[in-house]
Image: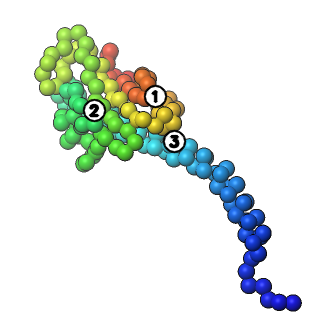
């Protein structure tokens, strides 16, 4: 009998086939878990912006002014963690102020009933679905295409 030092080609093919099947079964689950984790991180970012906005409103009895998509409102920047971005790799946040009756055009919104919202826009439809599933924990939101808009305050000043 001779000493065997390795595996035969059929043995290697069987092992590679089994590994391929396992990877093929596990990868979709991994991708789904990664999207769910990212959606929960987005909800955490929304909560951070929400707390900063309420702190600003408590101090000044007004809301920060509208800002461009991907831009942190200058009034909120000191109340958010250092370097907090509104533009990330997979999504963009947009601070929204929809004035109500009696609105003014000053830099901070003093309107009696503005609607304050934070929109999340992502081209990844699966991330959008995961975000909407994760959002069912208490913050009301609106849906428009790839955009999910979280309502932070309005019609009575809070949600």
- In the drawing, what numbered circle is on residue 138? 1
Q: Is residue 44 above or below residue 110?
A: below
Q: Is residue 62 above or below residue 70?
A: above
The reply to whether the C-beta atoms of the residues labelled 1 and 2 are less than 8 Å apart is no
Q: Is residue 19 left or right of residue 110?
A: right
Q: Is residue 75 above or below residue 84?
A: above
Residue at numbered disc 3: 36
N-terminal label among 1 and 3: 3
Q: Is disc 2 placed on a helix, strand or loop? A: loop
Q: Is residue 102 left or right of residue 4?
A: left
Q: Residue at x 19, y 31 (%)?
A: 59
Which mark's residue is nearer the viewer, 3 or 2?
2
Residue 135: x and y in percent read 47, 31
The outermost residue toward the top is 101
In which quarter of the view is residue 102 placed?
top left
Residue in view at x 28 percent, y 25 percent: 96
Return the x and y of residue 122 as percentages of the image width and height: 40, 35
* Residue position marked by numbered label 2 in the rendering: 69
Q: Position of residue 79 (x, y in %)?
A: 23, 40
Q: What kind of element bears circle 3?
A: helix
Quadrant the N terminus occupies: bottom right
Question: How far apart are the two marked residues, 1 and 3, measured between alpha carbons?
Answer: 17 Å
Find numbered disc 1 in the image and state the secondary structure of the residue it sits on: loop
Quick one: label 2, few (<14), some, or many (20+) residues within 10 Å?
A: some
């Amino acid at each position: 009998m001779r000493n065997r030092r390795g595996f035969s080609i059929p043995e290697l093919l069987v092992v590679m086939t089994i590994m391929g099947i396992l990877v093929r079964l596990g990868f979709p689950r991994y991708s789904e878990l990664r999207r769910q984790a990212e959606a929960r991180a987005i909800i955490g970012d929304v909560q951070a912006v929400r707390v900063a906005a309420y702190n600003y409103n408590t101090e000044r009895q007004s809301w920060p002014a509208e800002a461009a998509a991907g831009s942190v409102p200058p009034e909120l920047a000191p109340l958010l963690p250092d370097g907090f971005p509104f533009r990330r790799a997979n999504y963009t946040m947009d601070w929204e102020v929809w004035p109500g009756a009696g609105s003014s055009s000053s830099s901070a919104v003093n309107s009696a009933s503005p609607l304050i919202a934070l929109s999340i826009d992502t081209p990844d439809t699966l991330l959008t679905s995961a975000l909407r599933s994760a959002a069912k924990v208490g913050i009301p939101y609106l849906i428009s295409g790839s955009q999910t808009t979280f309502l932070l305050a309005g019609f009575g000043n809070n949600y």
